[in-house]
């Protein structure tokens, strides 16, 4: 099966309630988390898009990139993934969450090199619980209709989608690469642990 062209999507539409400020603006060794995620993705995809809620369209932090606007509310990250698959149905999507400050180049390269286009998605297994990590995943064009159906029947957890559909599952070499940050303490710990090794 030929590979669909790969676009990038940064999920930035969360409300960041536990962080108490917009995660996209957090300064991580001289660049925002949004800028850092875009820099990592842009090396590997045709275009990098930022996933936003409708009320974020004019946000100055996000306007520097092409935007894909959620079409569904109260669905969480699945809304952003589905919006991208719907907006550009011929593309596969390298999707990353905004709150992965320890994501590194090697982790992305390994994911892309082991991509299986015959599956609906290619994802890492969590180093914590052994379950799929949906927010650093390649979603193939064929995942659009099953994901839409999944949401229509009242389900919105991308991890459960990956568990119950054809997913290429990979071991994660660097266990902390996909550790997300949800609170100020999480972010401070990540910043301290990655001083000097953020590229």
Image (cartoon, helix red, strand yellow):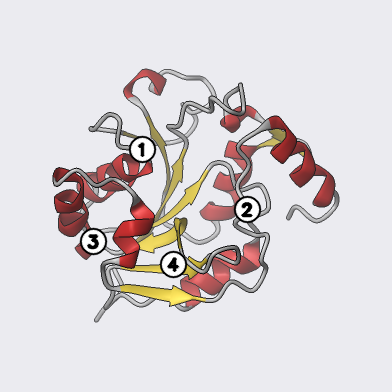
Determine whether, in the image, residue 51 is placed left or right of residue 73: right
Q: Residue drawn at (64%, 68%), measured in percent from left and top?
A: 106
Decide which of tag 4 and tag 2 comes sooner along the chain.
4
Give me the disc on residue 76.
1
Q: Are marks 2 and 3 in contact (CB under 8 Å)?
A: no
Residue density around tag 2, few if under 14, some if 14–19, many if 20 or more, within 10 Å: some
Q: Are marks 4 and 2 in contact (CB under 8 Å)?
A: no
Which sits in the foreground, 141 or 176? 176
Which one is in front in this view, the residue at disc 2 or the one at disc 3? 2
Quadrant of the rendered image containing residue 178: bottom right
Distance of label 3 from label 1 (alpha carbons): 17 Å
37 horizontally vs 28: left or right: left
Question: Which residue is labeled 4 in the image?
Answer: 123
Q: CA distance from mark 3 to mark 4?
A: 13 Å
In x, y percent, where is residue 182? 60, 37
Q: Which residue is mark 2?
A: 179
Between 101 and 159, the one nearer to me in the picture:
159
Q: Which image quarter holds the C terminus?
A: bottom right
The answer to whether residue 92 is seen in the rendering is no
Secondary structure beneath disc 3? helix
Q: Earlier in the sequence, mark 3 or mark 1?
A: 1
> Disc 4 to disc 1, how far (Cα)?
18 Å
Crowd around label 3: few <14 · some 14–19 · many ≥20 (10 Å): many
Locate residue 137 relative to residue 80 in the image: left or right.
right
């Amino acid at each position: 099966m030929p590979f669909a062209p790969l676009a990038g999507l940064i999920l930035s539409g969360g409300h960041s309630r536990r962080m108490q400020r917009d995660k996209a603006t957090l300064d991580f060794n001289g660049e925002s988390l949004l800028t850092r995620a875009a820099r990592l993705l842009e090396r590997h995809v045709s275009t990098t898009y930022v996933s936003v809620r409708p009320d974020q369209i004019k946000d100055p932090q996000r306007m520097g990139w092409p935007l894909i606007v959620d079409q569904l509310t109260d669905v969480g990250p699945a809304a952003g993934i589905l919006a991208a698959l719907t907006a550009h149905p011929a593309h596969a999507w390298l999707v990353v969450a905004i709150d992965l400050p320890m994501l590194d180049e090697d982790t992305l390269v390994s994911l892309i090199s082991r991509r299986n286009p015959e599956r609906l998605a290619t994802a890492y297994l969590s180093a914590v619980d052994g379950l799929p990590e949906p927010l650093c995943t390649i979603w193939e064009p064929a995942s659009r209709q099953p994901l839409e159906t999944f949401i229509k029947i009242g389900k919105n957890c991308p991890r459960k989608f990956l568990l119950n559909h054809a997913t290429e599952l990979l071991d994660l070499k660097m266990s902390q690469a996909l550790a997300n940050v949800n609170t100020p303490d999480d972010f401070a710990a990540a910043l301290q642990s990655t001083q000097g090794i953020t590229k």
